[in-house]
């Protein structure tokens, strides 16, 4: 391997070939601290040509490649295994905003651009790039595309896939495919772009992308509504969509236990309803208007009024300032943080047909209770997209580590139920190394065989992110 590493140093300069344990550590640790891998080296190219030359060197020496963006992924996709055979190829130095075309409503970016910086560059031109996740200060657009990230604005703007018009990719052979087309219509054969999006680095390395831009909304307004049950939350979703149409940009469900956990772990955060108020469920709503703030407020007030009259909701607070809106969003964003502070729990990132969510919860919660008495269900998520974070914490008094011994059984129970409701075992986080056994269990043999054929056709040497997805 010394000839290979020598070639890498020659291509990048030795400063950008990291080889000591200390230098490599941040690239080898999983975000949630569940796994630390080993690597031959961490390679930090600064241009597409350097990425291509490195991939050619890897192909020549049969060195596996783990592409990495911000390393915020949650399914062990961006870190190497323990073999020490792979290199981590970090895209962090490819961070140019290449072009903004306001008339075409597109921007062309390097894959290593941080999501928050892309949002800011779009805003500086009076445009909106709507992808938004809690990790936006660290994650990269290449990682967002490779995991087809979701986030909080999917209801209105779609997943990352829907926000991308073109890609530039380095293939596993080290060729550069320039598919940076800013076209909204392009029916010229197989859609290679859609193949690479969501491939988690197993088919090639995304080095650039053409992204869709939208007009900046003139105003957005946030509210928190309280109700008794997921059925009522679903009725509220329909009512809001009927009244507000595409202006509804966020619809987040949080059960009582979620807000109680946030109050317990972050007592300084303001609680909009009196402590222990007793509602079963809460929905955080966001509306955007391209007309004016008055328009947004009028739309929201009319819809909330109808929901109160129809006894769909029992209470609501509407944010009257940016600060209040931020503090409502903080409640939602602090749920995963409160869970982490409370101790490890068993997480599921699932999706279901929106219409079946109440029935899914009503069926699955008692099954869990029966199998794991007094376990605590921490259920929240992007209800408008049919995406639930369906997390299971230990009963009070039982240690979190001890409860993790049930992980496989809890996963099987939840995922079997998801399957029976026509859902998916991974809504937005992907498969990585964490869920590949589940994928093999739940996908049909035909679907798995098609996926394996694609992998074998594009990456016959199997050097791109081995051990992930398949
Ligand atoms: P990485 O973690 O570095 O990589 C993710 C995967 O993509 C890996 O398989 C990696 O090999 C591959 N990859 C990375 N870059 C490239 C590239 N250029 N070419 C080819 N393959 C590549 N996800 C959501 O979908 N919705 C959320 O709401 C959400 N919230 C989050 C909140 C927090 C606090 C955290 C920590 C994570 C959250 N995530 C969420 C998960 C994660 O942030 C996203 O999946 C994000 O898109 C990953 O981007 P990244 O640059 O960190 O990618």
Image (spheres, grey):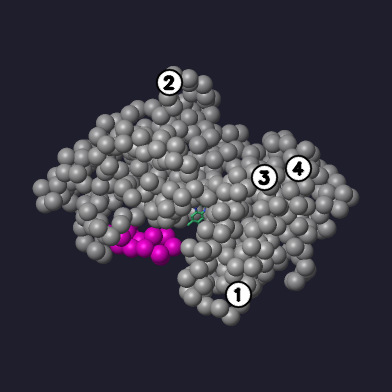
For the magenta stretch, what is the residue range? 24-37
Mark 3 falls on what kind of element? helix
Q: Are marks 4 and 2 in contact (CB under 8 Å)?
A: no
Residue 246 vs 261, above or below: the answer is above
Instruction: Determine if the C-beta at disc 1 is less than 8 A from ligand 1.
Output: no
Residue drawn 82% across the image and 52% down it: 312
Q: CA distance from mark 4 to mark 3?
A: 10 Å
- Work out whether 297 lies above or below 405: above
Between 142 and 227, the one lying in front of the other is 227
Magenta highlight on residue 286: no
Contact flag, marks 4 and 3 (Cβ < 8 Å): no
Farthest front residue?
445
Please identify the dominant SS of the magenta region.
loop
The residue that disc 2 covers is 189
**Label drawn at residue 395:** 1
Image mark for residue 238: 4
Find out whether the residues at labels 1 and 2 contact each other: C-beta distance under 8 Å.
Answer: no
Task: Give the x, y percent position of residue 146.
Answer: 42, 42
| Secondary element at tag 4 | helix
């Amino acid at each position: 391997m010394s000839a290979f590493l020598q070639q890498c140093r020659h291509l990048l300069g030795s400063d950008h070939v990291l080889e000591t344990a200390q230098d490599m550590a941040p690239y080898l640790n999983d975000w949630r601290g569940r796994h630390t891998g080993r690597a031959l080296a961490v390679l930090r190219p600064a241009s597409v040509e350097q990425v291509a030359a490195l991939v050619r060197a890897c192909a020549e020496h049969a060195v596996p490649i783990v592409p990495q963006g911000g390393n915020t992924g949650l399914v062990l996709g961006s870190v190497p295994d323990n073999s020490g055979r792979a290199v981590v190829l970090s895209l962090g130095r490819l961070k140019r905003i290449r072009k903004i075309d306001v008339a075409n409503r597109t921007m062309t970016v390097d894959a290593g651009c941080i999501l928050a910086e892309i949002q800011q560059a779009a805003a500086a031109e009076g445009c909106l790039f709507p992808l938004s996740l809690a990790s936006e200060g660290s994650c990269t657009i290449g990682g967002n595309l490779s995991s087809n990230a979701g986030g909080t604005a999917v209801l209105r703007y779609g997943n990352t896939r829907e926000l991308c018009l073109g890609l530039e990719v380095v293939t596993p052979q080290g060729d550069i495919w320039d598919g940076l087309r800013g076209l909204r219509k392009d029916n010229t054969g197989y859609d290679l772009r859609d193949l690479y999006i969501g491939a988690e680095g197993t088919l090639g390395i995304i080095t650039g992308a053409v992204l869709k831009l939208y007009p900046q909304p003139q105003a957005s307004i946030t509210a928190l509504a309280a109700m008794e049950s997921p059925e009522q939350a679903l009725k509220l979703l329909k009512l809001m969509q009927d009244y507000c149409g595409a202006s509804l940009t966020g619809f987040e469900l949080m059960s009582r236990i979620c807000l109680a956990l946030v109050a317990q772990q972050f007592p300084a955060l303001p609680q909009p309803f009196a402590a222990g108020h007793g509602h079963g469920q809460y929905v955080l709503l966001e509306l955007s208007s391209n007309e004016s703030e008055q328009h947004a407020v009028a739309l929201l007030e009319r819809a909330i009024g109808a929901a109160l009259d129809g006894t769909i909701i029992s209470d609501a607070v509407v944010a009257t300032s940016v600060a209040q809106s931020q503090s409502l969003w903080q409640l939602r964003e602090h749920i995963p943080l409160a869970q982490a502070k409370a101790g490890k729990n068993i997480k599921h990132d699932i999706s279901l047909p929106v219409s079946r969510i109440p029935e899914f919860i009503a069926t699955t919660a008692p099954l869990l209770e029966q199998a794991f008495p007094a376990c605590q269900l921490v259920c929240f998520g992007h209800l408008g997209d049919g995406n639930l974070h369906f997390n299971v914490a230990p009963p009070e008094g039982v240690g979190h580590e001890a409860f993790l011994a049930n992980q496989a059984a809890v996963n099987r129970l939840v995922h079997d139920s998801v399957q029976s409701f026509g859902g998916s075992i991974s809504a937005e986080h992907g498969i990585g190394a964490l869920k590949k056994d589940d994928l093999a269990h739940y996908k049909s043999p035909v679907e798995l065989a098609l996926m394996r054929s694609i992998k074998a056709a594009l990456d016959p040497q199997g050097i791109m992110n081995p051990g992930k997805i398949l």
